Image (cartoon, helix red, strand yellow):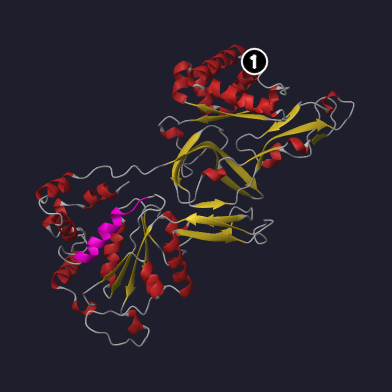
Amino acid sequence: MHHEIQKMREVALVYLDRSGGLQKFVHDCRKYNDSKQSYAVYRFIISINPSDIAELDATLGNYILHNPIQAAQIFQSVCFIAIKTLSLIEQLQTEAQISILLKPTHLPSLPSYVMSFSAFPFDYTSQRFYMSEGIAIAMGTVTKYTQGARFLCTEETCPFSEGFRYIRVHLPGATESATVRNDFVCSMCSSALQEDVKFRVLGDELANKMKIGNHYKIIGIPACVQNGLQATACIEVNSVQLCKPIGPSFVSDNFKHLLSLTSGSCWRFTAILANIFASEVVPPGTYNTLKLAILLSLVQTCEKENADYLDLLIMTSDTLVIDRLLNYSICLLPRGIRHPPSSEIFPSVSKDKHGSGSATIQACSAVLAQGGICYIGDLSSYKKDKLELLQSVIESRTTTVFIPGKKYGEEADHQVTISVQTNFWSFVDVDSASKKHIQRNNFLIGQMDTSLIPSNLLDVFGLLIYNEFPSCQLSSPLVHHILKKAIKPEAMLYKVSQQFRMQDYEEDFTV
């Protein structure tokens, strides 16, 4: 076994040299040495490409993937020898003072490396790397943890009452009490150990690299944290990668052909698209103005700061048809969210459900729809305070969450500002005035009643669409469409629905 370990140390050194990691390590050592400060723990982050390591030595590659904590000790020995041989850090005394964090660039694209809490049984004690991908739907307050600490023997005559013999370093999945507590004893004289607090090293390096609502790929080591009678399965993240939108995958051949046929006019292609759009929901040729507005809003979706957003507000009495059309349209996007009325539109604060009592910010509908559409339903069903908040968010594209410190165990109150990068869709039922027995003024032909919604809120929406069909006068094609769909829900009622499928639009809007 000793021969194997020695061979892996040699391979680790070769890899560091070839990958440029050795040069970075030397640079980090010089920063420590130049500070002239004595540290209990010297921490180094080493980027590891598992594929390159495996090509050099399969044993070390397998060791890194399946025994990362032990593999870090291999690199710890290599780094200690390098520091002493090259006199890189004069203050360093023991190998235990070196803390190595191995950061894999990726993991093999195999099912066994994908973390799935739904799979049973799941080995929480494996302490190896797994990867996962998803959207950050909540975040807690940032809490620093102890990366390393120095302990001294309380017996003054003991040789370990000074120096750096007892160094405690955080290991993945370990709780704070596993690193720092008051019941450690000296291995030489059995006296109690006491922490030298001025040498404690704190960290929270990854917490601030993630933002609520963003899409990430993470690599980490799973752990099971016990909190009283409750056990929580979690993952200690080692590496975070933001998943950037890559733009439309491609334009379908059907749309390319249509564009070539209509290239002689700058309006014909757009007009035809609006005419045939959503033919599974409404007949071609109906609601063209609204469908054009929907298409314009869909193409304006992106996850860039200060982007041009196009929010839609529809005044209508055909709430059922409009609702079906908008629900159909948000399904064309990966981040199209239909807001459930029973929940919050914007981020809210609650206590950590895992029992810690700290504050947790929930993303809610608007943030989950980042880079897409948040369809919030009928505006007339919301109370005044909700409408005022909606107006403020649409104007600034940010929302602020207030966290009262006393309520959540914090020393002081603080607030978190969250970016809201989404288009909002909504409608107003113009018949709700009569339903609520609101006296409506007489309007001239061509005018409409907007008294249900505050004028300031109306102004912040990019487009206001008035649906021209009263509910009691539905067009004949729409009536036929609804009746046929009720009899055969899956039937393709129009030839154009077969030529331009929902998938064609999905491909053009998918990012």
Is residue 52 a member of the stretch shown in magenta?
no
Q: Is residue 395 above or below residue 72?
A: below
Q: Single out the residue that lies furthest toward the right.
A: 157
Nearer to me, 420 or 51? 420
Residue drawn where x is 16% and y is 59% of the image: 271
Residue 420 placement, left or right of 23: left
Majority secondary structure in the magenta region: helix
Specify the quadrant of the image occupied by residue 365.
bottom left
What is the magenta range? Answer: 288-302
What percent of the width, then of the height, locates residue 441?
Answer: 32, 87
Residue 321 placement, left or right of 351: left
Q: Quadrant of the N terminus?
A: top right
Specify the quadrant of the image occupied by residue 493.
bottom left
Residue drawn where x is 61% and y is 42% of the image: 204
Residue drawn where x is 47% and y is 37% of the image: 131
What percent of the width, then of the height, locates residue 291?
Answer: 23, 62
Q: What amino acid type is highlighted by mark number 1?
A: Leu
Q: Single out the residue that lies furthest toward the front.
A: 34
Would you name the residue on which mark 1 appears? 86
Nearer to me, 360 or 508? 508
How many badges with numbers are in the image? 1
Nearer to me, 110 or 19? 19
Q: Is residue 465 visible?
A: yes
Nearer to me, 147 or 132? 147
Is residue 301 a member of the stretch shown in magenta?
yes
Q: Is residue 98 visible?
A: no
What percent of the width, then of the height, locates residue 20?
Answer: 50, 21
What percent of the width, then of the height, locates residue 85?
Answer: 65, 14
Specify the quadrant of the image occupied by residue 149.
top right
